[in-house]
Amino acid sequence: EYEPKISILVPMFNTPYNFFKELVDCLINQTYSNWELCLADGSNESLEYIKNMCKDSRIKYKYLGKNLGISGNSNEGLKMVTGDWVALLDHDDLLKIDALHEIVKVINENLVQFLHLKFFLLIMNLIKLV
């Protein structure tokens, strides 16, 4: 079975501590472990709590020194990606604990090259929209 590396790209700007902690926690606790988190931070200043929470080797963090906007920050984050698939998340998004496993399952069952999913993310519940 194909076990692709999923690169999760998150453009950041002055991300509050609680958002960042919840994002990191929901990824570290995923049932699927072949992922990397690529953080492109355009915050006004480098935030120590972000660097301190990037201890997992799957987390890549780059402080940009200035805000390039969501597109520019995302483009900088794409430069860090080494995975087979790229997922875009906002800094306040959360994923259900088995979300990446379910995405890889769909990829394996359908041999897709592009997958567009829309989710309602609320209290760690993931609901697929058709």
Image: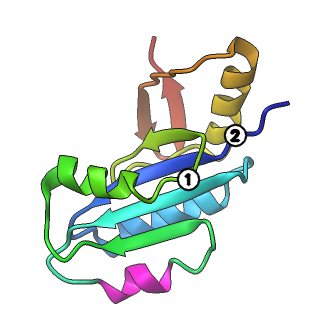
Q: Which residue is mark 2?
A: 4
SS at circle 2: loop
| Span colored in magenta | 47-53
Q: Residue at x 39, y 63 (%)?
A: 39
Dot 1: element: loop
Residue 89 point in image, percent of width and height: 39, 46
Is 117 located above or below residue 4 in the figure?
above
Q: Nearer the viewer, residue 17 or 83?
A: 83
Residue 122: assigned label: none
* Label 2: how many Cα within 10 Å (few below 14, some 14–19, many 20+): some
Q: Nearer the viewer, residue 15 or 4?
A: 4
Question: Relative to 116, is 46 on the left or the right?
Answer: left
Tell me what residue is drawn at x 14 percent, y 54 percent. 69
Residue 37 higher or lower than 103, as above or below: below
Q: Is the residue marked by circle 1 packed among few (<14), some (14-19), or many (20+) residues within 10 Å?
A: some
**The residue under label 2 is which amino acid type?**
Pro
Q: Residue 33: x, y in percent? A: 72, 53
Work out whether mark 1 precedes mark 2 in sequence or the reverse, and give the earlier one.
2
- Magenta stretch, main secondary structure, is helix
**Residue 42: percent from the left, percent from the top?**
21, 68
Residue that badge 1 annotates: 82
Q: Nearer the viewer, mark 1 or mark 2?
A: 1
Estimate the spatial distance between the alpha carbons at disc 1 and disc 2, rounded to whole Å: 11 Å
Q: Residue at x 30, y 58 (%)?
A: 76
In the rendered image, residue 50 lying in the magenta stretch gets the answer yes
Q: Amino acid at mark 1?
A: Thr
State yes or no: residue 34 in magenta: no
